[in-house]
Amino acid sequence: MSLLSGTPGAVAAFSGCLNMNAHDTKHPLLVLENISKVYPGVVALSNVTLSVRAGEVLALIGENGAGKSTLMKILGGVIAPSSGKVIIDNVAHDHLTVTQSQAAGIAFVHQELNVFDNLDVAANMFLGREIRGGALRLLDLKAMRDAAHPLLARVGATFRPETSVAELSLAERQLLEIAKALSIDARVVIMDEPTSSLTLSETRTLMKVIADLKAQGIAVIYISHRLGEVEDCADRVFGLRDGHVAGELSRDEINHDAMIRLMIGRDLKSLYTPPTRAVGDIILSLKGVRIGANPRARADLDLHAGEILGLAGLVGAGRTELAEAVFGIAPVLEGEVLLAGQPFRASSPREAIQAGVYLVPEDRKRAGLVLETSICENISLADFQSVSRNGLVSGTKVAERAEAQRARLGIKAADVQRNAAELSGGNQQKVVLGKWLSMKPRLIIFDEPTRGIDVGAKWEIYKLMRALAEAGVGVMMISSDMEEVIGVSDRILVLREGEVTGSLPRSEFSEHNVLKLAVGAH
Amino acid sequence: MHKKDMGLALLIIVVGAIVYMRNPLFLSPINLGNTANLIGLFGLFAIGQGFVIMTGGIDLSVGSMIALLGVLFVDMVGRFGVPWPLAMLITIGIGTLMGLAHGLLITKLKMQPFVVTLCGLLIYRGVARGYTGEATAGFPFGVSYPELEWLTIGRSFGIPHSFYAMIIIGVICWFVLHRSVFGRHLQAVGKNEDAARYSGVRTGLVITAAYVTCAVLTSIAAIYFAMFTRSVQPSSHGNFYELYAIAAAVLGGFSLRGGEGSIVGVILGAVLLQQLQNLVNLLGIPSSLNFAVMGGVILAGVLADQQFNRYRQKRRAARALDGLGNVAAAPS
């Protein structure tokens, strides 16, 4: 049904001009044409062309940072493209506004749910379009509730219009957002990672709602990392990679491997570089550790010097919280933490850092970097003592230290005096790494180290992790990216609700085994 | 000196030249001396405010602290005969405790700086008025304190000692903010407290230290003010001074979001504010318009600065887009 043959080469060579597809029986609802978006130092999107047809489920896939969210924000009129057009109903917009986007029937169901939990369901649904009545033009609460009712029924919601949103679960809030989209007569509903916080049965309900929307002729743009769901519901898959069109798959071409190739541009089996020497002594050991995030669970784990230990699990399994407890961000309530056999309990990151325990945090922009500060200041941030004399910081030494890390890590920047904010995600992460590598690491915890990072930089970070392990540093890697966790680790521990549910040696690595332990036996 | 500071210095020179052309008295030694004195007095606590604003916080209690500490200092020396060096130490000690209280409430109990120091503003003013029973605190008639007066209101080479005090403290603070490890930590905390904490910076300590620094400099200013006015009227002394300090910092390039600003900038900001006051007097503008002139200049200054930055950012983005066009055109 497509111009494309099934070979990956043809998929990769393909770019743009989807709206000219000769087999297309339906006229496209909207077309994003040659869209580029450039931020200082980062090209978020480069010449992307994408069309959406009525009544189709179009899955938008790509790794974090591939440009999916940016593209959708342009479609929503939230940000303006640097160049390119959005064509809706044959009208081309250089700069679509939010109002124009909404008027055209484009509705968002956001990843971070944009609901106001101080208001009730009906008020949320009609926010900004409140129904008013009476001589004083006051809010007509009854009319809004009456109007909300059938919409909620359409998405299979069991809560009532007058329920306070604060009482709704995440899944219910998601349904509310979809109902809201219906209330503005949406023709295109964009769902950004809609299932990331849903349970399995809630996900099934959502799939049913999507099928209903489709039957009503509404187009759904479905953004998800969960390839299984995409396989289930998508009519067409559109791939982005590093801001470029990676290609697209028609219904009969959609399968797991093809989608992975689309996202990362190659097969992933080759990620692993085996260690050249046997693992060393245990560097970190947790015995019955209880933390505030999962107060009923106890975690046990051993990490050897020289190994890369992968920590897998679903979002919310408590991996980050455990790492942060080791790093002194949150307290260890009970249990024993041993660092190289010695009791170790950091009550602040400062203490952890002094012991040589470093964390590369999950949220790079919040906790990893001071964005609006120079690269060199960021690299010295944890250790100004060693670049200063008599309490006065030496600008020369700060710069020298940064230059050394720039050379070692290949940080692509015009100048180490430039702000970290100007760098691409991969280079920003290298700055975070440079901060720790310029000190004396014994144990480094990488929390989602390659989130939002381009493929090339990912490789460099994996190589660096291996080099650190070879140098006898303990390397722990928390990752929700299955390919990464399987491809990079020497051993995988799986966590569920704060407890370690299993340890897999390399010979037992498989997506199936990891998931089984992550979800729990059924 | 940063570009921003240069711009401000240029503005001061231009305004000065205009005022001088309209009224040559502007550059008379008497006028310059008096203005320098006021710059010294206001500059002292404006620098302190700069440290707090650097953390992304604010200290609204400055004016009331100047009143309360002024009352206490005058009373200690004038009424109770406490030797003035000891009185100074006690005054600065009390100020330190106030700053410490602000800092701890903000960092340990996670209260908002605005709320904490707003309560400080009300409490210190109220205590000053209650303690004196609304009476003006002053020195006994005919008594003088030659060393204290030399130190605070004396002059050397025609320049008032308050100005020297501000310069000395300004230089120390310049090293602290721009060259010390603490200064780096302070700037990092102001820009991104989480990232600083994850890098092992003791963020609570750093923020508390900023409030203590502000309070200490304010206490020193309080002593200078008390000696300058000779008597302290508890309900009006120091009124709105916190706003002068904030205005000087903002003019000097500090961002109220934290993490940005320089000592040179805040001092120049204090200079410009006093110059504007002086302008109002010298050009015969009704002094009731004083605040309006100040507000107008701050608004215009900050607006111009922001527009300039936006223009620069746009240019940078446009250049980046051009670069992309070339890359995209080459292959495929």
Image: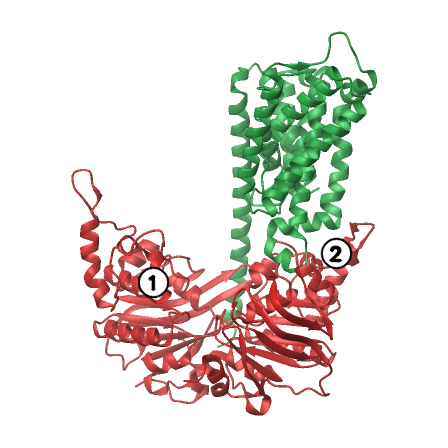
Chain colours: A red, B green
**Amino acid found under the numbered disc labelled 2:** Phe
Please give the label number shown on residue A199: none
Which x, y percent locates residue B253? 61, 40
Number of residues whose C-alpha sits closer than 10 Å to that of mark 1, classed few (under 14), some (14–19) or many (20 or more):
many
Task: Please state which of residues A270 and A167 is positioned toward the viewer in this rendering.
Answer: A167
**A293 in relation to B129, above or below:** below
Residue A401 lies in what quarter of the image?
bottom right
- Going by the numbered disc 1, the residue's amino acid type is Arg
Q: Looking at the rendered structure, which numbered label has been put on residue A384?
A: 2
Which element is circle 2 on?
A: helix
- Relative placement, left or right, of A62 versus A357 is left
Q: Residue at x 67, y 26 (%)?
A: B69
Task: Name the outermost residue toward the top.
Answer: B142
- Residue A507, x across and y down, in percent: 58, 92
**Residue A299 location in percent, x, y?**
58, 74
- Chain letter for the residue marked with disc 2 in the picture: A
Quadrant where the C terminus of chain A sits is bottom left
* Front-most of residues A506 and A70: A506
Q: Which residue is mark 1?
A: A173
Q: A307 and A248: which one is in front?
A: A307
Check the image and report above or below for B140 versus A43: above
Q: In percent of the image, x 66 and y 87: which residue is there?
A: A274
Disc with the residue nearer the chain's start (2 vs 1): 1
- Cα–Cα gap, marks 2 and 1: 46 Å
> Percent position (x, y) of residue A508?
55, 91
